[in-house]
Amino acid sequence: MRRFPPERIVCLTEETVETLYLLGEQDRIVGVSGYAVRPPRVRREKPRVSAFTSADLPKILALAPDLVLAFSDLQAEIAADLARAGIAVHLFNQRDVSGILAMIRTLGALVGCPGRAADLAAGFEARLASVAEAVRERPRPRVYFEEWDAPLISGIGWVSELIGIAGGADVFPNLAREPAARDRIVAPEAVVATAPDVILASWCGKKVVPGRIAARLGWDGIPAVARGRIVEIKSALILQPGPAALTDGLDAIRAALHPPIYR
């Protein structure tokens, strides 16, 4: 970086945007991902410079950022292009709850407020523990989380962990350890065999159609389908590995697993 703490930051994914706002460091942000929606004011305050796997490099360079924040192998080429242009890039790669908390602490250190970041992360840790304790004695419904519908892709690490914290049991826990979506593809018959009590779906930015899930061949015998327990979790709440998933995302999962009729 040309200066510390960085005065001009571009965020290519949503979770670093939300974290900087929660830390009170939003004035450092000069450009954001088009998927950034938390807090809602970000859409009117910050220019959009990227999608997820593509970015407007000339627009980013024109903003003269001190630091660009990216995420995962899916943005590796964008990060490489920026690095070749002389821009400092930090590429996060969190895939589980501990990684999300580490991201928050690391981001705080990068912008010169490690104490506030540590407090923020500690608050999330306490909240997660409180939720887990509140549902500890309840029956644990079996949960299939569907991240995409064609092909069927099961939930990633932090999603699986949050299902457990909310009082459920992911039916594909081993697949959740796979960071790449292609390695979490499941056959429809495999889902049927797990007999989930609840189906949670978040089709990565596309509206979930529960009726389409229920109509799949052979799925009418799945307990979740037979009992009408197919619930959409909005992508912005659960598929971004950041504060949203630890708060509203977790709450949405808990409400789906333990609605009043089942309590």
Image: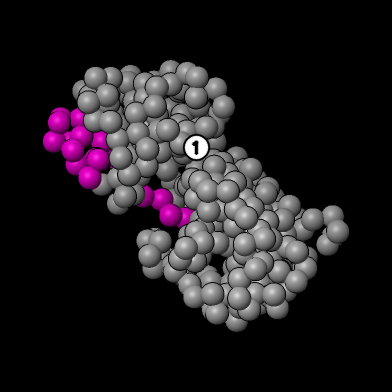
Q: Which residue is mark 1?
A: 118
Residue 48 locus on image (x, y percent): 39, 27
Task: Using the rendered image of the protein, determine whether residue 102 is visible from the camera's viewpoint.
Answer: yes
Q: Quadrant of residue 32?
A: top left
* Quadrant (top left/top right/bottom left/bottom right) for the N terminus: top left
Say above or below: 250 vs 62. Answer: below
Residue 46 locus on image (x, y percent): 43, 21
Residue found at x 75% / y 71%: 226
Which colour style is shown? one colour
Residue 197 locus on image (x, y percent): 71, 70
Helix, strand or loop at mark 1 = helix
Between 243 and 10, the one lying in front of the other is 10
* Quadrant (top left/top right/bottom left/bottom right) for the C terminus: bottom right
The kind of residue tagged 1 is: Ala
Residue 104 locus on image (x, y percent): 45, 39
Say above or below: 224 vs 235. Answer: below
Residue found at x 62% / y 50%: 233
For residue 51: magenta?
Answer: no
Say above or below: 212 vs 83. Answer: below
Residue found at x 52% / y 70%: 173
Residue found at x 24% / y 40%: 79
Q: Quadrant of residue 5?
A: top left
* Neighbourhood count class around disc 1 (C-alpha, 10 Å): few under 14, some 14–19, many 20 upward: some
Q: Say whether residue 29 is left or right of residue 97.
A: left
Between 227 and 237, the one lying in front of the other is 227
Residue range highlighted in magenta: 77-97
Task: Using the rendered image of the protein, determine whether residue 137 is visible from the camera's viewpoint.
Answer: no
Between 9 and 216, the one lying in front of the other is 216
Q: How many marks?
A: 1
Q: Say whether residue 228 is left or right of residue 145.
A: right
